[in-house]
Image (cartoon, helix red, strand yellow):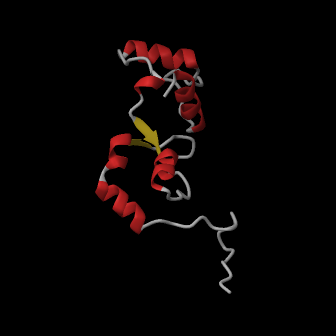
Amino acid sequence: MPDHTIAAVLNRSGKSTSCGASWTRSRVCSVRYQKEIAVYRDSERVEVTLFEAAEVLTVWIPQQVCKGAPWIINRTDLEDEDVRLEAQTHRMRRPSSANPPQKTLNL
């Protein structure tokens, strides 16, 4: 992810720096530099988020486990025939309402 996105995810997750400060793009960039982690380049991206994977597999993902942090899946895994068959088997329909207790009326 880009540095500013990493900073936003860390802040939403309630994580702070070792000094107790909030994360900024500059602070993430500094840690990346210290740890010799390469700069994010969108053109080199090989993973997809959970929601991008759901779109490819035409399934609905109800929610994330860690709010604010994207789930990452290798794009090549989505091309695997076993993954595609499993997704077809467990395909879910989007509910008509965001209210979980609301039932579907089958006429």
Q: Residue at x 49, y 16 (%)?
A: 29
Residue 11 lies, with reference to residue 21, above or below; the image says below
Q: Residue at x 68, y 82 (%)?
A: 105
Q: Quadrant of the C terminus?
A: bottom right
Residue 32, how many percent across, how many down?
42, 17
Going by the image, does 107 lie left or right of 30?
right
Q: Residue at x 36, y 63 (%)?
A: 86
Residue 80, how many percent across, how many down?
30, 51
Q: Residue at x 33, y 46 (%)?
A: 77
Q: Report the number of discs.
A: 0
Going by the image, does 106 lie left or right of 49?
right
Q: Quadrant of residue 93?
A: bottom right
Residue 68 lies, with reference to residue 31, above or below; the image says below
Nearest to the observer: residue 58 or residue 90 = 58
Residue 49, how many percent across, how many down?
48, 42
Residue 5 lies, with reference to residue 85, above or below; the image says above
